[in-house]
């Protein structure tokens, strides 16, 4: 990995291994709300970039980078011997503020004078532009200006949103140069033999006019609170201890990695899809991660369910591939989304998020017996089931299938979503509507699990309508199971087809997708055994 990334809630920093954000590394920066706020952060001594000695982020939430100076000269005269000064950069994010400490130590047996400079800039670039996926109408920078113990760079977005980057410091620099392309601050340091000196910086993005700057805490208080939040997360999570130290370390690191991905948009914590480019809600990714976390930390499933319910589709909108009851695919909040130049506000082009939403509700309630959550979700459950039966089955095949409506949407709407991911053995692309094998398993699991839960509600309340609903769901699941076996099974391969495409033609390519169906319990027992065996055979187990 040739980069360093740290994240807390909705703010993350992506740099090179030296901790710099340089113009030559297009994707590095400080991001929030799908916007790059810090596009340059370069540390120099006497105008020269530093050499890296070590770079680590073992605790995930804090990075420590050790650097040293190269030889520096001025007018042909040596100004600093190489490796005279050690620089330790420590940074973390807490409550929407990036904290950075630059500690300089003189390892020479005599005093040294040198200039330590930091170069800053902000381009306020939308994430989709950074990634090269989209150009578009954008706003303009309003320049840099002094602001108390620091400076700010402003931006007027094409979406009407004002954005600012705030930079502050604990110690006033000797020089500060503000220009259209950012700012430079310089400290003139003189360190005795073995002497150290630390400089603290505080960097924060602000989105929206009139929004006050985030509260700045004392550094030790902030890092202490952050560390304690990780300790609390570990205590709240299921502990696993084995006689294999390597496994124990891997499990502990896995817990930390999940904690980094957690974000709260107001409905409770849920995992975003991944760093650096997918630090946003993704229906499929967030739901599956929460499902797999149920034995470890079921509260994450609750936050995920509530977040997805908040954005459940409410209308027919082909621009966003939205229909009533559908669960979103991806939510973006940058400038291009705000000006409707991309449909991710949210975008609903996913075929599996809606049944996975129902699966997660069912499994969460089974694990926790949270009847209040189930009752609160009943309207959302009804709408999601209605979407499956109406919009998911628009071709009348009895299988949930997809096709793209949005001009800027996604053609393949399963977890393999690249343009060439669903192809026949001949190499011909599958034609929509496409019914993926794993999605039928999700639908089956959703209906059987919810059917059993509703049966329990009937027993508790005595209401006949719960019993009727329960019977209907279980009956629909059994019908789907029979049709699935008839339409997807490939006897010659002893395996299931990847999908059915237009005209219910099987896409007979052998892939790992049928493995998802194993968790649903839909496959016939002997066929499930054949699938499991093939998945771990040499052609597929790679």
Image (cartoon, rainbow, N blue to C red):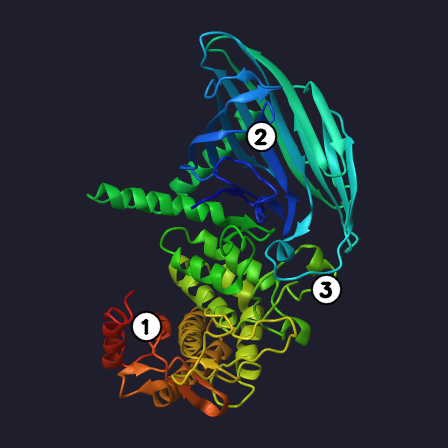
Residue in the foreground of this view, choosing between 62 and 68: 68
In the rendered image, the residue lying farthest to the left is: 243
Residue 421 drawn at (x, y percent):
45, 74
Residue 216 visible, this angle: no
Question: Disc number at residue 340?
Answer: 3
User: Is 515 situated left or right of 184 in this image?
Assistant: left
- Residue assigned mark 2: 43
For the residue carrying disc 2, how many other residues have a C-alpha within 10 Å: few (<14), some (14-19), or many (20+)?
many
Q: Relative to 415, say whether 61 is above or below.
A: above
Q: Are marks 2 and 3 in contact (CB under 8 Å)?
A: no
Assign a secondary structure to mark 2. Answer: strand
For the residue carrying disc 3, how many other residues have a C-alpha within 10 Å: few (<14), some (14-19), or many (20+)?
few
Residue in the foreground of this view, choosing between 54 and 499: 54
Measured in 3D between alpha carbons, the distance from the residue under mark 2 to the one under mark 3, in whole angstroms, is 38 Å
User: Is 228 situated left or right of 202 in this image?
Assistant: left
- Residue assigned mark 1: 518
Query: Residue at 53% of width from left, 55% of height from top?
Result: 278
């Amino acid at each position: 990995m040739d980069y360093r990334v740290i994240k807390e809630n909705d703010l993350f920093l992506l740099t090179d291994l030296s901790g710099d954000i340089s113009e030559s590394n297009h994707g590095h920066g400080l991001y929030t709300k799908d916007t790059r706020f810090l596009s340059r952060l370069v540390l120099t001594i006497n105008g020269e970039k530093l050499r890296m000695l070590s770079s680590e982020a073992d605790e995930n939430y804090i990075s420590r980078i050790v650097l040293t100076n190269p030889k520096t000269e001025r007018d042909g005269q040596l100004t600093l011997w190489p490796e005279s000064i050690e620089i330790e950069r420590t940074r973390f994010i807490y409550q929407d503020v990036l904290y950075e400490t630059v500690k300089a130590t003189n390892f020479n047996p005599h005093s040294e004078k040198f200039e330590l400079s930091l170069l800053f800039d902000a381009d306020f670039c939308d994430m989709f532009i950074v990634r090269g996926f989209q150009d578009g109408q954008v706003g303009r920078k309003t320049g840099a200006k002094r602001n108390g113990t620091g400076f700010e760079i402003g931006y007027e977005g094409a979406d009407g949103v004002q954005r600012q980057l705030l930079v502050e410091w604990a110690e006033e620099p000797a020089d500060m140069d503000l220009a259209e392309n950012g700012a430079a601050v310089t400290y003139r340091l003189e360190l005795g033999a073995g002497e150290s000196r630390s400089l603290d910086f505080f960097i924060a993005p602000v989105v929206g006019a009139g929004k006050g700057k985030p509260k700045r805490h004392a550094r030790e208080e902030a890092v202490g609170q952050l560390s304690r939040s990780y300790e609390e997360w570990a205590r709240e999570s299921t502990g696993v201890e084995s006689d294999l130290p390597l496994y124990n370390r891997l499990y502990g690191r896995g817990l930390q990695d999940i904690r980094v991905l957690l974000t709260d948009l107001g409905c409770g914590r849920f995992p975003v899809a991944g760093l650096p480019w997918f630090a946003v809600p993704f229906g499929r990714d967030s739901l599956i991660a929460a499902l797999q976390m149920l034995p470890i930390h079921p509260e994450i499933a609750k936050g995920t369910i509530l977040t997805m319910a908040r954005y459940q589709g409410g209308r027919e909108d082909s621009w966003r591939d939205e229909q009533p009851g559908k669960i979103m695919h991806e939510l973006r909040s940058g400038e291009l989304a705000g000006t409707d130049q991309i449909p991710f506000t949210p975008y609903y082009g996913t075929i599996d998020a809606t049944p996975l939403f129902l699966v997660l509700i069912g499994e969460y309630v089974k694990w926790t017996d949270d009847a209040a959550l189930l009752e609160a979700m009943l309207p959302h459950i009804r709408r999601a089931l209605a979407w499956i039966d109406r919009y998911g089955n628009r071709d009348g095949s009895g299988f949930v299938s997809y096709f793209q409506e949005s001009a800027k949407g996604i053609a393949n709407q399963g977890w393999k979503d690249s343009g060439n991911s669903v192809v026949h053995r001949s190499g011909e692309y599958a034609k929509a509507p496409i019914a993926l094998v794993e999605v039928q398993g999700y639908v089956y699991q959703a209906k059987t699990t919810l059917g059993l839960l509703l049966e329990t509600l009937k027993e508790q309340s005595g209401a006949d309508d719960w019993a009727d609903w329960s019977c209907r769901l279980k009956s629909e699941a059994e019908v789907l199971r029979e049709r699935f076996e008839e339409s997807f099974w490939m006897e010659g391969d002893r395996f299931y087809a990847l999908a059915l495409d237009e005209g219910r033609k099987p896409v007979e390519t052998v892939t790992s997708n049928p493995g998802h169906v194993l968790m649903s319990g839909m496959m016939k027992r002997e066929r499930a055994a054949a699938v499991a065996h093939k998945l771990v055979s040499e052609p597929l187990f790679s």
